Image (tube, coloured by chain):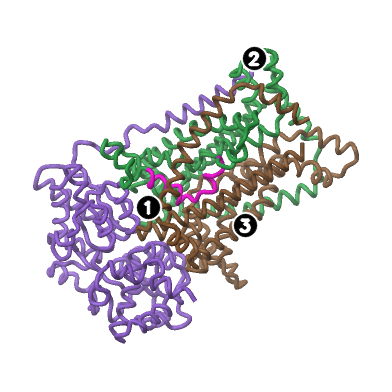
């Protein structure tokens, strides 16, 4: 089956052109500029590099960035799937508004988002007052960071799922239905596996984006060393001391971790897709 | 035909393009232009100074000058100039940042000798802002380390103003006890009371004044007055400590850029203008401490007598202070590592 | 004439299989609840602050010359960035989904990379590449070419940040679709370009459209990376998000949120465009 498919694939034209252009553009916009991070780290030498990237403050920042990004994207997976499903499948008043506002986190500058959240959850803010009654501190804690990151990552999940859900062939659902499968069974056995690659993509993107997020988080994080300092802030503070090499070193580690994570997830996806076919 | 929609996208895209292309983003070319790259709190100051200077220059030479401003964190701004932001003059929060520009050969090593009074046309100091009525009875530096007091100050790693705050607190204790160890313990206790380190001075002000966090804000004297003006003197009041640091935010011409732009004359006139009585008056109006004795006398009510010490009395110079306290692994990092 | 039927059939069938009412109500309510906390409240904040001093002041804020210049710069950036990234997205999606080659997984990962790059780093790399300290940047400077701290720098940084959006939207979609139609057309003697424009493109129009919407939304709102490569000079290198920040730093909160609300309107505008295009598609497919 797969061999036949491979043969068929290759008869389509345009490989050279599309591939060439893709590689060229990718190199010009992404690879060459990103390699600067590497080239600026190299002159540092190994010892200072290790020192820079394993300083306790830096390690704590990595931990915080990764853990908050993880929880935020987990939340986004559920909220994103829910939203995409509701928007594509149901008709209800206000649907167009929801659909329109999904992109808001993209269009709203991250700094504005950060300011909004910090103001909302500050002791004097609309929600801060409520949370203060429950003795729940949100602003200047990791919880606050997670909230901001949920906002930042949310559209990634919805907008990756939406087109796939839109094109999902309903005939399969139909036949499952006529074969006596319940709605929940159909969803779990048929729809979810079909959506899974897109869901995984969306969540990964949200996660990756969250690790590096700066603008919205610094307003709500508190930025206390060892406690609420995120990794990008470490880069920023090194830069502000004119320590380009140190900043590049921290950036390089962040980059390598994210890259290998993306690589792994793409591999999982590939494998998952093959299994699905 | 199925092709319809592709045409529509093309149409939409070209419409977007047409609407997006601006008539002209550049300023009128006839006038000579200066770019002043400055730090955060001077926005209001230079707005007034620039207007006054343009008038002055017009009267003196008949030429129109355009002065563009760029504001941001002091370190960030210095970095931008190093990386190619073509500033004609820099007016930053601390000498260390201009030293960094000098290190990249954009201006002479001895830049600080080129203009009067350490190239600092005005000074300032570090004071406290508390909520109206001073409910926590904060009078002096020692009150900031009382357990339970919440202190707002920005991150010394990313904010120039925050470094002045830190050095003022350290200097106060070291002068009082003659012991750097005690000063370090004091600083440690002080930062234990800090719940949030914003990246810039303005961020801290907003945290304190707008979001209602903290009992006391450590701030530039000029910022403290601006807070009263912008957020209401019925909500906040200024407390001046007994001892504080003499903060000297210096100015300099970026030699390489003015030579490239042919704007040296204008740039020199601009910086020298800051020392004139007229400019000094504007400086005092904006709550910076003027160098000019007449202006200082005129606005004496705004500047309570605080015993001010020089940075060099306690920390030798900026490079040393930076290296000992704010560099990675320096004292500021140490107070946070258990 | 080859014509895909998908859109008519899907919409028709979709309505037949549906969830029970209570499921719909619960799911819709949950969605709204989420939106209240994460979208409506922040949005409400923006507008509450923007209109704090009334309509007249609001209009004054958004028609102020510096705000207009910032808007022009932002729109110019979008107008250049979106088509470039769309072209790239189509090309990358075609290469990746229609062919098998070694290193495909790596290529796909590289496409995602800009997402994983912190905006701070995204700005930094261009400073490191063409900043005046670097040999290349120095050479450019000597020849009077300004990239960083001027408009080209802002455009390049935005290109980087929004780079994967369209490709990322198209790839899963094209992977989920069979290649039968294209292959059939090929055997019938259609040329490559014909196949692409008459079969592939109509099939992926939603993805392309979503991708372009996302890409424009993100380019409108990008703050971190642009902030690093912009000189922050009013009226010159100030995009709308940067202008919002400047106003905020001047304690000019109302004006700051008023300008931020323009960005919200722009985001809504792109989606209104999407909805009206959708309607056209539906009409056309019904006519066919």
Of C15 and B274, the residue lying toward us: B274
Quadrant of res A133: bottom right
Residue C190 bears which disc, if any?
2
Nearer-the-camera pick, B49 or B316:
B316
In the rendering, what colour is chain B?
Answer: purple
Secondary structure of the residue carrying numbered label 2: loop
| Residue C146 located within the stretch drawn in magenta | no
Q: Which residue is mark 1?
A: C246
Give B221 or B184, whichever is nearer the viewer: B184
Q: Chain of mark 2?
A: C
Spatial separation of the CA atoms under disc 2 and disc 3 = 48 Å
Q: Where is the N terminus of chain B found, in terms of image quarters? A: top right
- Which chain, by letter, is green? C
- Chain letter, brown: A
Q: CA distance from mark 1 to mark 2?
A: 55 Å
The residue singled out by tag 3 in the image is A70
Whether residue C55 is visible to the viewer of this picture, yes or no, is no
Task: Specify start and end residues of the magenta stretch as a single range.
Answer: C111-129
């Amino acid at each position: 089956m797969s061999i036949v498919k491979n043969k068929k694939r290759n008869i389509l034209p345009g490989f050279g052109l599309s591939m060439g252009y893709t590689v060229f553009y990718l190199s010009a916009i992404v690879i060459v500029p990103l390699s600067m991070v590497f080239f600026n780290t190299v002159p540092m030498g190994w010892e200072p590099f290790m020192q820079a990237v394993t300083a306790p403050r830096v390690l704590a920042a990595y931990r915080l960035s990764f853990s908050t990004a993880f929880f935020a994207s987990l939340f986004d997976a559920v909220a994103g799937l829910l939203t995409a499903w509701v928007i594509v499948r149901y008709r209800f008043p206000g649907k167009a508004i929801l659909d329109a506002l999904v992109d808001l986190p993209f269009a709203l500058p991250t700094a504005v988002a950060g300011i909004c959240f910090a103001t909302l959850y500050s002791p004097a803010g609309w929600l801060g007052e409520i949370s203060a009654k429950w003795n729940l501190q949100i602003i200047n804690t990791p919880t606050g960071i997670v909230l901001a990151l949920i906002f930042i990552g949310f559209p990634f999940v919805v907008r990756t799922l939406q087109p796939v859900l839109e094109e999902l062939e309903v005939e399969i659902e139909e036949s499952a239905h006529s074969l006596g499968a319940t709605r929940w069974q159909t969803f779990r056995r048929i729809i979810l596996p079909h959506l899974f690659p897109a869901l995984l993509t969306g969540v990964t993107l949200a996660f990756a984006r969250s690790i590096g997020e700066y603008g919205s988080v610094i307003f709500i994080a508190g930025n206390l060393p060892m406690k609420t300092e995120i990794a990008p802030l470490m880069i920023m503070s090194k830069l502000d001391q004119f320590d380009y090499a140190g900043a590049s070193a921290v950036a390089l580690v962040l980059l390598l971790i994210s890259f290998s994570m993306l690589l792994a997830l793409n591999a999982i996806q590939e494998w998952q897709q093959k299994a699905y076919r | 035909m199925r092709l319809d929609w592709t045409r529509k996208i093309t149409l939409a895209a070209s419409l977007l393009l047409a609407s997006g292309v601006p008539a002209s983003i550049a300023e009128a070319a006839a006038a000579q232009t200066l770019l002043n790259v400055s730090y955060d709190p001077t926005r209001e100051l230079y707005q007034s100074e620039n207007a006054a200077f343009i008038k002055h220059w017009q009267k003196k030479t008949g030429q129109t000058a355009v002065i563009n401003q760029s504001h941001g964190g002091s370190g960030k701004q210095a970095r931008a100039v190093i990386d190619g932001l073509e500033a004609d003059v820099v007016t930053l929060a601390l000498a260390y940042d201009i030293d960094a520009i000098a290190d990249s050969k954009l201006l002479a090593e001895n830049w600080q000798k080129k203009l009067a009074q350490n190239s600092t046309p005005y000074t300032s100091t570090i004071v406290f802002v508390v909520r109206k009525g001073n409910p926590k009875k904060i009078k002096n530096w020692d009150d900031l380390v009382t357990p339970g007091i919440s202190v707002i100050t920005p991150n010394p790693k990313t904010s120039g103003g925050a470094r002045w705050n830190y050095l003022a607190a350290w200097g106060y204790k070291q002068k009082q006890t003659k012991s750097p160890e005690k000063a370090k313990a004091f600083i440690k206790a002080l930062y234990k009371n800090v719940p949030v380190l914003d990246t810039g001075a303005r961020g801290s002000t907003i945290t304190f004044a707008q979001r209602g966090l903290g009992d006391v804000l450590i701030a530039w004297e000029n910022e403290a007055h601006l807070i009263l003006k912008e957020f209401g003197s019925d909500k906040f009041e200024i407390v001046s400590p007994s001892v504080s640091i003499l903060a000297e935010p210096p100015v300099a011409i970026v030699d390489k850029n003015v030579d490239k732009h042919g704007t040296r004359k204008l740039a020199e006139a601009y910086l020298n203008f800051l020392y004139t009585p007229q400019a000094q008056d504007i400086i005092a109006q904006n709550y910076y401490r003027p160098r000019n004795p007449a202006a200082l006398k005129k606005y004496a009510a705004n500047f309570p007598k605080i015993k001010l010490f020089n940075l060099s009395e306690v920390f030798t110079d900026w490079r040393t202070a930076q290296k000992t306290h704010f560099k990675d692994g320096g004292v500021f990092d140490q107070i946070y590592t258990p | 004439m080859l014509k895909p039927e998908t859109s008519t059939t899907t919409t028709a069938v979709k309505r037949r299989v549906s969830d029970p009412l209570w499921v719909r109500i619960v799911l819709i309510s949950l969605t709204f609840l989420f939106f209240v906390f994460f979208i409506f409240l922040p949005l409400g904040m923006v507008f509450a602050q923007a209109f704090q001093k009334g309509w007249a002041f609001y209009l004054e804020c958004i028609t102020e010359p510096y705000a207009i210049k910032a808007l022009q710069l932002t729109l110019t950036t979008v107008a250049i960035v979106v088509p470039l990234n769309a072209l790239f997205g189509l090309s990358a999606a075609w290469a990746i989904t229609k062919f098998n080659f070694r290193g495909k997984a790596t290529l796909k990962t590289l496409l995602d990379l800009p997402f994983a790059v912190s905006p701070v780093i995204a700005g930094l790399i261009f400073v490191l590449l063409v900043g005046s300290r670097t040999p290349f940047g120095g050479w450019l400077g000597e020849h009077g070419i300004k990239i960083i701290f001027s408009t080209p720098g802002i455009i390049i940084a935005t290109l980087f940040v929004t780079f994967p959006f369209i490709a990322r939207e198209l790839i899963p979609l094209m992977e989920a679709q069979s290649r039968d139609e294209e292959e059939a057309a090929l055997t019938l003697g259609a040329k490559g370009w014909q196949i692409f424009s008459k079969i592939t493109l109509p099939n992926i129009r939603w993805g392309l459209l979503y991708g372009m919407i996302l890409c424009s939304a993100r380019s409108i709102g990008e703050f971190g990376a642009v902030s690093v490569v912009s000189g922050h000079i009013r009226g010159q290198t100030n995009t709308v998000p940067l202008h919002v920040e400047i106003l905020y730093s001047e304690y000019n909160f109302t004006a700051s949120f008023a300008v931020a609300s323009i960005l919200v309107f722009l985001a809504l505008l792109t989606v209104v465009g999407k909805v009206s295009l959708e309607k056209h598609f539906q009409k056309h497919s019904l006519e066919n």
